[in-house]
């Protein structure tokens, strides 16, 4: 009985325990892995980009669907940062583009995320009784699960990739603090989701904390290594832009072939505009769980509201982040990093549409919010913590079932 309790509480798991955890997690994702084939996953633009790279070209095949792609000088390009495509290159080279399943790869990366979450919780000295609840909340009670389930899409696969590198950044800061590696992880996150470059702020805050509070000396060599790693990532992105559009500062977003409401927005107000702030603020912080109805008397379910659900309505347990018991310097820089990313997103023309029961752009700072939540959750009643996490997981399950049945 004691052994079973240790297993389910993630108390000093053995190699066999981890094998069981990973196997169970993968089994739970089998429907998503199979769903890849029912959603034309092989036309994932990152897979096509990887194939193009192997062919010595940065442009995508002219037969590619133009949605979410940029069109420039008669060629189609992937407008997003290149790292997820680079990760897929060896898989495409070995198996062939037709046999690469991005959901399966995202599931493997999620297993690494699971281990990193456990490691981070251990380093933060979170009470052991909270481990299984926090882990369940993160992987099944936030937008992470939706991103994993839909990682046959370009943006969702990028979210899982960036999430992994954010966790690697935090884990390295809490552990060995090899600053060149911290910079590399932030750079990799940036080469997946641009706003994550702002993790530089938290890393700088951690340096300040080590200097002022822990009296730990940070050598000039370490600082240079940190800056160099990030600088190389930014330089690579600029070169990537220049080779595609002839301008290092042209990300390609303005060349995207938009459709529907996003086209209406961009045509009138551009990619970034203050006009988008009220809508995005509402969707990210206020908007509730919403099922759309149709038909006579609006009594028939149409689908889930694809504008999503706000962060704390979908995952209420994250409010524990406001109770975090941590060094004042680290809390300030964590919140500054989170808010800076969030404020930048408010001006963007899209809030993450299409998305189910999540504000998926919050995944760009969710790992840091998870750290704060984990450090504050013991200050809430245990019954409330369990209730909020259970609610979040059940809400995700309900929304996924409705979306799968009625989309």
Image: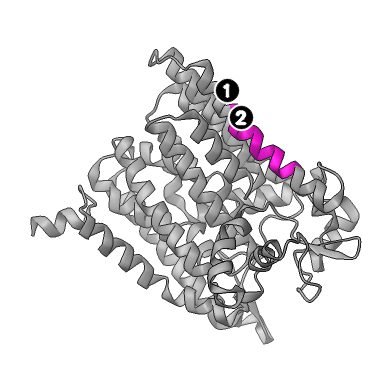
Q: Is residue 69 above or below residue 227?
A: below
Would residue 97 be seen by someone viewing this image from the given angle? yes
Q: Position of residue 163 (x, y in %)?
A: 51, 50
Q: Nearer the viewer, residue 356 or 386?
A: 356
Q: Which residues are magenta?
A: 227-238
Q: Position of residue 92 (x, y in %)?
A: 58, 68
Image quadrant holding the C terminus, namely bottom right
Q: Residue furthest left?
A: 1
Would residue 359 be seen by someone viewing this image from the given angle? no
Any magenta on residue 390?
no
Q: Residue at x 55, y 43 (%)?
A: 365
Return the mark for residue 228: 2
Label 2: few (<14), some (14–19) or many (≥20) C-alpha neighbours in 10 Å: some
Q: Position of residue 354 (x, y in %)?
A: 66, 65
Image quadrant holding the N terminus, namely bottom left
Q: Nearer the viewer, residue 58 or 285?
A: 58
Q: Is residue 381 above or below residue 32?
A: above
Q: Position of residue 158 (x, y in %)?
A: 59, 57
Label 1: few (<14), some (14–19) or many (≥20) C-alpha neighbours in 10 Å: few
Any magenta on residue 229?
yes
Q: Nearer the viewer, residue 135 or 174?
A: 174
Element on which disc 1 rests: helix
Q: Quadrant of residue 380?
A: top left
Gap in angstroms between the C-alphas marked 2 and 1: 6 Å
Q: Is residue 332 left or right of residue 308?
A: left
* Residue receiving disc 1: 224
Asked whether disc 2 touches disc 1, contact meaning CB atoms under 8 Å apart, the reply is yes
């Amino acid at each position: 009985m004691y052994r079973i309790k240790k297993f389910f509480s993630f108390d000093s798991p053995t190699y066999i325990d981890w094998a069981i955890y990973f196997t169970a997690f993968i089994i739970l994702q089998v429907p998503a892995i199979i769903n890849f084939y029912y959603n034309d996953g092989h036309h994932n633009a990152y897979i096509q980009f990887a194939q193009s790279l192997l062919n010595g070209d940065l442009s995508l095949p002219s037969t590619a669907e133009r949605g979410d792609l940029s069109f420039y000088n008669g060629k189609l390009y992937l407008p997003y940062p290149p790292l997820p495509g680079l990760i897929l290159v060896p898989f495409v080279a070995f198996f062939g583009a037709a046999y690469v399943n991005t959901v399966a790869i995202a599931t493997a990366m999620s297993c690494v995320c699971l281990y990193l979450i456990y490691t981070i919780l251990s380093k933060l000295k979170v009470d052991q009784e909270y481990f299984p609840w926090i882990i369940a909340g993160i992987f099944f009670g936030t937008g992470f699960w939706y991103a994993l389930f839909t990682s046959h899409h370009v943006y969702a696969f990028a979210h899982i990739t960036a999430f992994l590198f954010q966790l690697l950044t935090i884990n390295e800061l809490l552990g060995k603090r090899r600053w060149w590696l911290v910079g590399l992880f932030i750079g990799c996150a940036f080469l997946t989701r641009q706003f994550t470059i702002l993790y530089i702020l938290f890393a700088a805050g951690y340096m300040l904390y080590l200097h002022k509070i822990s009296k730990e000396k940070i050598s000039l060599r370490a600082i240079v290594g940190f800056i160099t790693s990030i600088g190389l990532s930014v330089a690579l992105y600029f070169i990537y832009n220049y080779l595609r559009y002839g301008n290092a500062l042209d990300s390609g977003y303005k060349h995207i072939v938009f459709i529907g409401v996003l086209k209406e927005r961009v045509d009138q107000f551009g990619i970034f505009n203050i006009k988008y702030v009220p809508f995005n603020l509402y969707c990210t912080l206020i908007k509730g769980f919403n099922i759309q109805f149709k038909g006579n008397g609006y009594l028939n379910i149409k689908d889930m509201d694809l504008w999503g659900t706000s962060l704390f309505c979908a995952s209420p347990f994250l409010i524990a982040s406001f109770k975090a018991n941590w060094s004042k310097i680290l809390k300030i820089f964590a919140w500054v990093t989170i808010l800076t990313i969030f404020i930048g997103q408010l001006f963007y023309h899209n809030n993450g549409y299409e998305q189910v029961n999540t504000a998926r752009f919050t995944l760009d700072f969710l790992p840091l919010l998870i750290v704060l939540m984990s450090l504050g959750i013991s200050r809430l009643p245990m019954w409330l913590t369990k209730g909020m996490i259970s609610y979040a997981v059940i809400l995700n399950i309900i929304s996924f079932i409705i979306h799968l049945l009625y989309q």
